[in-house]
Image: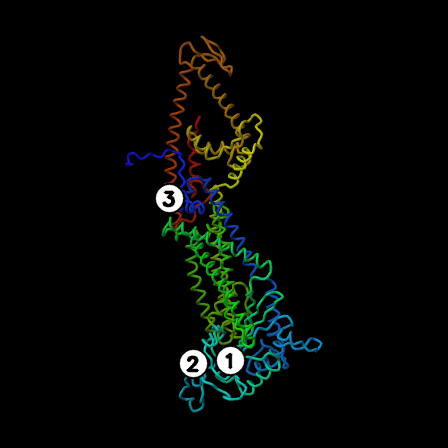
């Protein structure tokens, strides 16, 4: 068919639906980004509601999955383990938290650690049966054997100044994996097969690095497993103590073990680290990772499994949706914040789905190995670490998913206050942020240099940075600063509080306050983009009509008249916007933007009354033109339904001619008013753009916002101009 023979599309003709594969996919994944919803308010609301309902279901499933990963029981399990191994006192009244030197470490290992790992007696000193051996608190199964691991640096790993070389023969630098000591030491052949004296690489041990206070430590080192019971473990500990396993080159000692509680199906991966810095002394730290590695045991767990399957379906759905949107918008797709947020949520979810499958396979393999070889160390440290990262990723995804809810409620002006305020003041906040961080970082560096050697909160640049943020929130220790320097400490504190707290923070609040006030004023003068109440009321009335649940008592069909339909009709008769708005608000009793049958009847009666008054006024004018008194008959007259005589004879202008002339004058007046309104609208737009440029200028600051002549809202100026213009008779 040639181009000239192609049919021209008929107006209001519905587009034909494509039944191809892509057409079906597009119908299932129709969104505001893939459809031209701006052409139809009803289509916009329908699409938005459909997206919102689907997303609420997705959010519900996601919350069910995430809340199943953690519980209050996890906290109490962690607390029980921490109290046992961190707070139990030694015979010398010390604990792991209070370790300050090598002797404190050995006292902890020989008493609280051994007694905490091996519960071989009941509370009444009766022996625990063999089948119950290896339980902590009689409830938590110790998996495999606990392990000690040491990291050392080799001798002369640092450089001694030439003036002290004759006095200092050995030098041990702070820890670095490049200067690790890998040579065997201690007794080489003691007949007990101790492995603590021989170095093993991270590939042999299969562990992971650890971030401590002083350094990041590798997974290698000198390793020694403890025994199955208290006697064996204590023998190993005493041997290492007597043979001076911890030397001057020791920089870190790790104690690793894992327990499992079958009552609550939870693992607790425990790591106790003691760092021995080059300065001397000891710094204890710890890690308790309570995780649920075996996911599906109870009926509730299998319900979560079903939710995880539904979650995967939702992710697949949203992947297809984003592909369709990218296919349509190309690079413009990345211009929207919500689209970028969608991609981040999908990527995090895909990574979590992959890790969930990987975790299940690895745990199953590790449990089989542990059952076959119960006399080895059960290395759940790496798996526990990544399980914690997995929970963190899911938490971030859920947080972003809740933020995304604003995308689907943005059609309501109240719901856009936050985004509108932040977007409007973004430039001001960016400029303020530069100024704030210049001052803040200056105080951070000053505090670090002044008090870094004496105050723990300023011992590093990072600590000083967060300490100053805490001071803003009222969390500070003034006495410690004053003790560090009686002159500079108080001066530093007062200067920081004045410039940052009293000046900069109040500037920040003023920017937010002023912008929020502007947004509130602008929103009070705007209508909602779409009214959900109107949409639901209209759909409800249609449904009631279809179900024959409405009664027609002399009113006919109860059809609702929308505001936009009313404006189109009255504009066709030449009415101005102000008159239309005034008429609609006069009879819109319930405040909705729809006129029901009662409101339509009231408006009809008012219009009939005004029409009769207008006819009487025209008849009086006609009688005066013919020189007759009102109500006086002359010639032949016909009585109309209103009882007013129509003059057909005599000298002067006839009534029909007068009516015809009046109609012509009305049409001319309507045309003039419409053209005048168009001119005023154009002038308002020009004036609005001019005032916008003027408001952006810093010199404009003293103009009152209450004066309509200087208002930034063009509708206020338009209303003032229309008040001054002559009204239509």
Task: Give the image location of residue 413, x and y in percent.
Answer: 49, 45
Q: Which residue is mark 2?
A: 179
Q: Residues within 10 Å of mark 1 (few under 14, many from 20)?
A: many
Q: Which residue is mark 1?
A: 223
Task: Give the image location of residue 686, x and y in percent.
Answer: 36, 41
Q: Secondary structure at mark 1?
A: strand
Which quadrant would residue 20 be assigned to in this image?
top left
The residues bearing labels 2 and 3 have C-alpha atoms spaced at a distance of: 69 Å
Q: Residue furthest top?
A: 635
Q: Which residue is mark 3?
A: 689
Q: Nearer the viewer, mark 2 or mark 3?
A: 2
Establish if 275 lies above or below 342: below
Which quadrant would residue 101 be assigned to in this image?
bottom right
Which mark sits nearer the N-terminus, 2 or 3?
2
Residue 77 seen by the camera:
yes
Relative to 599, is 688 on the left or the right? left
């Amino acid at each position: 068919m040639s181009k000239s023979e192609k049919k021209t599309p008929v107006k209001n003709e519905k587009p034909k639906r494509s039944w191809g594969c892509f057409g079906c996919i597009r119908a299932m994944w129709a969104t505001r980004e893939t459809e031209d919803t701006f052409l139809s308010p009803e289509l916009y609301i329908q699409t938005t509601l459909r997206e919102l309902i689907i997303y609420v279901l997705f959010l519900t499933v996601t919350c069910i999955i995430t809340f199943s990963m953690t519980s209050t029981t996890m906290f109490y399990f962690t607390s029980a383990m921490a109290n046992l191994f961190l707070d139990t006192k030694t015979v010398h009244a010390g604990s792991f938290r209070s370790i300050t030197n090598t002797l404190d470490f050995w006292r902890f290992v020989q008493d609280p650690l051994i007694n905490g790992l091996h519960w071989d007696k009941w509370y009444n000193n009766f022996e625990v049966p063999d089948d119950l051996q290896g339980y902590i608190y009689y409830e938590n199964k110790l998996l495999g054997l606990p392990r000690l691991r040491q990291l050392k640096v080799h001798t002369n790993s640092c450089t001694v100044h030439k003036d002290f070389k004759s006095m200092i023969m050995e030098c041990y630098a702070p820890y670095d994996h490049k200067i690790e000591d890998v040579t065997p030491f201690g007794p080489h052949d003691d007949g007990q097969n101790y492995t603590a004296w021989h170095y093993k690489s991270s590939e042999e041990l299969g562990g992971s690095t650890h971030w401590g206070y002083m350094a990041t430590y590798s997974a290698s080192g000198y390793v020694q497993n403890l025994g199955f019971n208290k006697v064996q473990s204590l023998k190993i500990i005493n041997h290492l103590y007597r043979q001076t396993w911890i030397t001057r080159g020791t920089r870190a000692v790790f104690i690793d073990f894992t327990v499992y509680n079958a009552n609550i199906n939870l693992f607790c991966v425990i790591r106790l680290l003691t760092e021995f810095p080059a300065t001397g002394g000891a710094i204890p730290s710890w890690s308790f990772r309570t995780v649920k590695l075996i996911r599906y045991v109870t009926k509730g767990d299998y319900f979560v499994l079903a939710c995880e399957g539904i979650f995967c379906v939702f992710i697949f759905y949203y992947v297809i949706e984003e592909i369709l949107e990218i296919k349509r918008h190309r690079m413009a797709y990345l211009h929207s914040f919500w689209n970028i947020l969608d991609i981040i949520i999908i990527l995090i979810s895909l990574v979590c789905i992959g890790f969930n499958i990987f975790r299940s396979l690895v745990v199953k393999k590790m449990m089989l190995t542990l059952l076959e070889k119960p006399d080895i160390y059960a290395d759940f440290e790496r798996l526990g670490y990544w399980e914690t990262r997995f929970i963190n990723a899911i938490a971030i995804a859920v947080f972003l998913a809740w933020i995304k809810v604003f995308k689907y409620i943005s059609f309501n002006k109240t719901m856009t206050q936050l985004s509108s305020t932040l977007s409007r003041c973004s430039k001001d906040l960016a400029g303020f942020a530069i100024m704030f961080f210049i001052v803040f970082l200056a105080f951070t560096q000053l505090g670090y240099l002044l008090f870094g050697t004496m105050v723990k909160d300023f011992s590093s640049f990072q600590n000083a940075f967060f300490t100053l943020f805490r001071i803003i929130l009222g969390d500070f220790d003034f006495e410690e600063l004053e003790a560090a320097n009686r002159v500079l400490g108080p001066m530093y504190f007062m200067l920081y509080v004045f410039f940052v707290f009293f000046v900069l923070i109040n500037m920040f609040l003023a920017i937010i306050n002023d912008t929020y006030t502007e947004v509130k004023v602008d929103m009070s003068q705007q209508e909602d983009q779409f009214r959900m109440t109107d949409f639901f009321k209209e759909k409800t009335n249609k449904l009631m009509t279809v179900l024959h649940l409405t009664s027609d008592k002399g009113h006919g069909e109860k059809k609702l008249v929308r505001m936009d339909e009313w404006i189109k009709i009255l504009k066709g008769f030449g009415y101005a916007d102000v008159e239309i708005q005034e008429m609609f608000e006069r009879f819109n009793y319930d405040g909705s933007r729809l006129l029901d049958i009662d409101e339509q009847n009231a408006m009809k009666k008012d219009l009939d009354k005004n029409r009769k008054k207008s006819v009487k006024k025209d008849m009086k004018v006609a009688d005066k033109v013919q020189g007759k008194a009102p109500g006086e008959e002359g010639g032949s007259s016909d009585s109309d339904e209103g009882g007013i005589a129509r003059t057909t004879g005599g000298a002067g202008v006839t009534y029909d001619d007068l009516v015809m002339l009046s109609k012509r004058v009305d049409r001319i007046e309507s045309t003039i008013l419409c053209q005048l309104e168009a001119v005023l609208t154009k002038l308002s737009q020009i004036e609005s753009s001019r005032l916008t440029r003027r408001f952006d200028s810093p010199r404009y600051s003293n103009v009152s916002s209450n004066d309509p002549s200087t208002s930034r809202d063009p509708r206020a100026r338009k209303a003032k101009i229309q008040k001054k213009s002559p009204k239509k008779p």
